[in-house]
Amino acid sequence: MLNSRNLKRVAAFSACACALIGASQIPTSSADLSSQITANRATEQSLRQQINAETQQIEKTAGGVAAAKQNLEIVETKLDNSINELRDTQTRLMESRQKVLDLERKLTIASTALASNLRSVYENGSPNLVDVILESDGFKNLLQNVSFVKRAQTEDADIVTFTRRARAEVMAEAIRLGKLEERDRDLTDSILDQRNQEAEIESALVQQQIDQEEARASKRSKLSNVTATIASLQTKLDAQVAAAAKQAEISHEQAQVQVNQQVGGLAIDTGSMIQAPPGAPAAVSEMIAAGNAIATLPYIWGGGHASFQSPGYDCSGSVSFVLDAAGLLSAPETSDEFMSYGDPGPGKWVTIYATDGHVWMTIAGWRFDTVALAEDGTRWSQGGGEFDGYVERHPPGL
């Protein structure tokens, strides 16, 4: 039995062990890393939203560019047609003006000829029928001379009249074509202005699209940097968490070993077997002896449950065998049943760690666990063991 002095020493050491475990929690810098990761993730999410919004805007702008190009093509087609029409009108106008000039010359010639004929008639007198008869050589010649005089006088007048009429018609056509040219020119200028406006709109939209794509590329670069920063911070945080967990495990084991040493000392290693330390309770000595008896037997699933005597044992079968040898268990239990075995919390000499899938124990500072067996080893080992999620129990008084 432990005296009051020893109990006080155990309590003081337990407080020290709890302080060691608490000191092994995630350091303050890990909290800073988590805060930085959270802030960077918020920035990452904001950048992704901005990139998505800009992508949608770029798609709209691209649609505007396509529409502007289509409008520009339509206007350019109209402009080409208008230019061709203007050129055709100008060609016809030039032809009409040239024709007017030709008719002017012909009219001048005809008028001159007519004036000359009239002057000749006035000066020489108009040939009369008597003169024609007297000067004619025969009746046939007489008829020809009379017809020629009449036809000459008529044709002179007809030529002048036709030429004047043709000149008036061509002049009217030239005036009409001149007005048509003016209209076509105005139309062409209007379409040209529209083409220039459409070209400016297209150019502005293209520049806007370029600016938007550059802005999106900049945000994508920032997003890449933020993502890389998050990955780096997460790696550091994972390393710190792992280190803290490892330190907690080591501190827990050291605390458990030191508690056992305070209450009676650490069991002695004699190869694959151990010996109870001096002053250990009889139950502890019996448990260690039982553990030595099956320490090197193979792992057999369900071994030790049908009977305490078995060629091999599983985890709960091993713990049940050891407790039975010390009179602390009447029948084999499963790992989940050990979650409610004995008293709660760690014991002074013995602590059982149980979940619904595995169970192991420490006796006088040594871990007794089938996981330590490997292939040709022993169930006894120092250090290691799992703690997270395990329920700690101990035999009453131990």
Image (cartoon, rainbow, N blue to C red):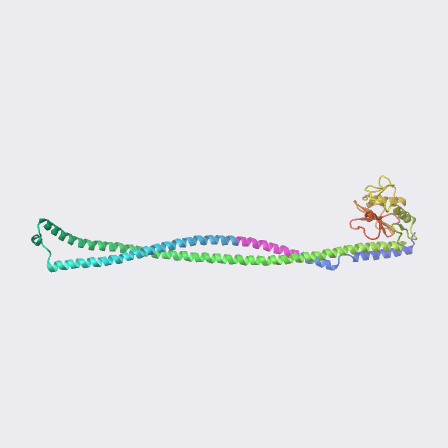
Q: Main secondary structure of the magenta part?
A: helix
- 202 sits left or right of 116 in the view: right
Residue 216, compared with residue 340, is above or below; it is below
Q: Position of residue 20 (x, y in %)?
A: 81, 57
The residue located at (73%, 58%) in the rendering is 30
Please tell me in which quadrant of the rendered image residue 110 appears.
bottom left
Quarter location, residue 192: bottom left
| Residue nearest the viewer, comparing 283 with 103 | 103
Residue 320: image location, x then y, percent: 86, 44
Q: Residue furthest top?
A: 306
- Comparing 353 with 161, the one in front is 161
Instruction: Tell me where residue 246 appears, x and y as whole percent.
Output: 78, 55
Left or right side of 163 for 10: right
Residue 40 percent coordinates (x, y): 66, 57
Within the magenta stretch, is there residue 204? no
Q: Is residue 39 visible?
A: no
Describe residue 37's horizontal placement relative to residue 108 as left or right.
Answer: right
Numbered disc total: 0
Residue 58 painted magenta:
yes
Q: Which residues are magenta?
A: 41-60
- Is residue 218 shown to the viewer in this render? yes
Residue at horizontal 90%, vertical 55%? Answer: 6
Q: Nearer the viewer, residue 134 or 211?
A: 134
